[in-house]
Amino acid sequence: AADSPRGTARALDVRQREVKTELEALQAERNRVSKLIGEKKAKDQDAAAAMAAMKDVSARIKQLEGEARDAEAAFAETLMRAEMEQRSDAVLDPLTGLNNRRAFDETLDEQILLARSTGQPLSVLLADIDGFKLINDEHGHITGDSALRQVARTIRVSVRATDACFRWGGDEFAVVLPNADADEAAELCERIRGAVLASCFDPYGVPLQVSCGHTELDDGMDTRQLLEAADDAMLSLK
């Protein structure tokens, strides 16, 4: 789109080239006029006119040089904004607005390293929507998408400010809980279950429910084992 960051960048790039072309032409004109002024055969009247033209050309060059600097700065800022938006899109789930699996993997690896270096606890919570396939089969995918958005919104407002929420895949959600032990993770599981039950509904007004499992990082655990433990805890509630 013309008003998108990349469309704006293209327009700015065209303007930069136009300014450069005009600058080159004016600089050539200034050189020509300077040569004319310097010629001994130039008449006094021609010299005066040349001096006036030289003044106008110099003023225009100064104006264009300012425009060129402004265009270059705007171009750089627009490209940076476009790159930031592209990076954001790469880690964002468009349906729920939560970060996606790629972002989850990166965040979990970072938090495991941090927990190892600081000795602080780290927990992971996994949750999925009970009977989600039946919701899709009986009511269609639009209703299923609504259920995902409702649960995602409820999880997001239920966690602590320091926690990170993700759509892990399908109807599964994940929360990374820095500096949280198993007891704190269990409390959050109960809070999420209660909040979903109270605020998320199918088309007939029947409350949605989620199964929620958690685990705390142990010294001998790697990333795969941590996730398997949380997944097993969630499945045990089915």
Image (cartoon, rainbow, N blue to C red):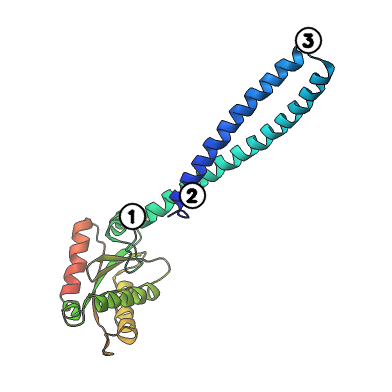
Does residue 67 lie above or below 112 as drawn? above
Residue at x 72%, y 19% (from the top left corner): 34
Residues under labels 1 and 3: Cα distance? Answer: 69 Å
Residue 85 is situated, as x and y percent measured from the top left of the image, at: 42, 54
Circle 2: residue type: Thr
Horizontally, residue 65 falls left or right of residue 216, namely right
Residue at x 54%, y 41% (from the top left corner): 15
> Do the CB atoms of the residues marked 3 and 2 lie less than 8 Å apart?
no
Report the front residue among 5 and 101.
5
Residue 161 is situated, as x and y percent measured from the top left of the image, at: 43, 68
Residue 201 is situated, as x and y percent measured from the top left of the image, at: 29, 85
Task: Describe the element under mark 3 as helix, strand or loop.
Answer: loop
> Do the CB atoms of the residues marked 1 and 3 lie less than 8 Å apart?
no
Q: Is residue 221 visible?
A: no
Residues under labels 3 and 2: Cα distance? Answer: 51 Å
Q: Mark 1 or mark 3, which has the lower sequence index? A: 3
Circle 1: residue type: Ala
Q: Is disc 3 surrounded by few (<14), some (14 to 19) or many (20+) residues within 10 Å?
A: few
Residue 133 is situated, as x and y percent measured from the top left of the image, at: 16, 76
The residue sitting at the bottom extreme is 205
Q: Mark 3 or mark 2, which has the lower sequence index? A: 2
Does residue 100 lie above or below 21 as drawn? below
Q: Give residue 8's mark.
A: 2
Residue at x 76%, y 17% (from the top left corner): 37
- Nearer to us: label 1 or label 3: 3
Task: Describe the element under mark 1 as helix, strand or loop.
Answer: helix
> Do the CB atoms of the residues marked 1 and 2 lie less than 8 Å apart?
no
Residue labelled with disc 3 = 41
